[in-house]
Amino acid sequence: MTEPTLVSAKGLTISLPDRGKSRVFGPPPTITVVKGVDLEIRRGAAVGLVGESGSGKTTLGRALIRLLPVASGSLTFDGTDIAQAEEGTLRPLRPRMQMIFQDPMSSLNPRLKLGTILTRPFEAFNVPFPEATRRDTAAKLLDLVGLPTDFVDRFPHELSGGQRQRVGIARAIALEPDFIVADEIVSGLDVSTQAQILLLLRELQARMGLTLVFISHDLSVVRALCDELVVLLHGEVVEAGRCADVFAAPQADYTRALLEAVPLPEVDRGWLDTGAVRA
Ligand SMILES: Nc1ncnc2c1ncn2[C@@H]1O[C@H](COP(=O)(O)OP(=O)(O)OP(=O)(O)O)[C@@H](O)[C@H]1O
Ligand SMILES: [Mg+2]
């Protein structure tokens, strides 16, 4: 049975203020970075979003959870039109859509202990939890992502890169979201740590019924985790479909070129399941 659509975009277009240009009078010029993107993301799917640097992956990912304004086109989340929604409409939806960033060091406040970092989302969205259970709540989240519960008293800099990314994941799942956009979250990590993080994400996805957009320039990683694939080029979708189909028979020239650039032994569906990567 096909799952219902959770996120749907039609003709989604995102323009940003152009960093490179400024004007003395009038609004700053804008640059259109995502151009007329159509997407249907089914509940529970893991969608890989790939494309070369500058193709608009991060911009599209941020726009899908309305961290950016939409210039034109439609965008719905669980049936609610959020393309032009005001913050008041978005606020109750915000806990349900989360983002995990590439560099946890810069997204985790270095002055706060993990116990505080992990309970901030509850405070930010007024989700009640008794102060007495702050440590328990944080400890439970640490346990969910495979970290020792006594890490509640640690600071981010006391952790390894892989451990920090686990904290980034724990923070993203704290409010039990439906939808997570993960942007290059394993890029800075060595291969065996990458695999452990991907395994964790896959396990959490299954356990929590998460819908995932997984942004990566690494096709082998996408193939190991995702069931659908969207290929972006210059802000436009050049190919979309089931991962297995696209890998077996890419339709667009650009996708073919991308696939040819990947060393074959790494494009192994079972890569994540080999015991070798479990440390
Ligand atoms: N504020 C901005 N002003 C001008 N150009 C921008 C701005 N933000 C992004 N861009 C440009 O928009 C394009 C898409 O950027 P984006 O960061 O979404 O790409 P990406 O696919 O995530 O790239 P990467 O793989 O390097 O992370 C790039 O050409 C980038 O230089
Ligand atoms: Mg990016």
Image (spheres, helix red, strand yellow):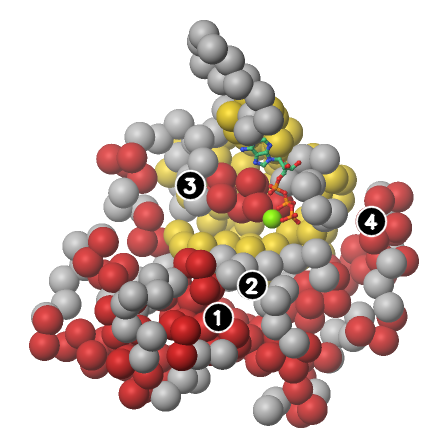
86 relative to 54, above or below: above
Label 4 vs label 2: CA separation?
A: 22 Å
Label 4 vs label 1: CA separation?
A: 29 Å
Mark earlier in primary sequence (4, 1): 1
244 relative to 90, above or below: below
Q: Amino acid at mark 2?
A: Ile
Give the numbered dot on residue 255: 4
Foreground mark, 4 or 1, reads: 1
Residue 106 percent location from the top left of the image: 44, 59
Residue 210 percent location from the top left of the image: 46, 63
Q: Any atom of ligand 2 within 8 Å of the CB at mark 2?
A: no
Q: Which residue is mark 3?
A: 67
Mark 2 vs 1: CB contact within 8 A: yes
Ligand 1's quadrant? top right
Foreground mark, 1 or 3, reads: 1
Mark earlier in primary sequence (1, 3): 3
Which structural element holds mark 2? loop
Image quarter of the C terminus: bottom right
Q: Which residue is mark 2?
A: 185
Mark earlier in primary sequence (3, 4): 3
Residue 25 percent location from the top left of the image: 45, 7
Label 1 vs label 3: CA separation?
A: 21 Å
Badge 2, how many Cα within 10 Å: few under 14, some, many 20+? many
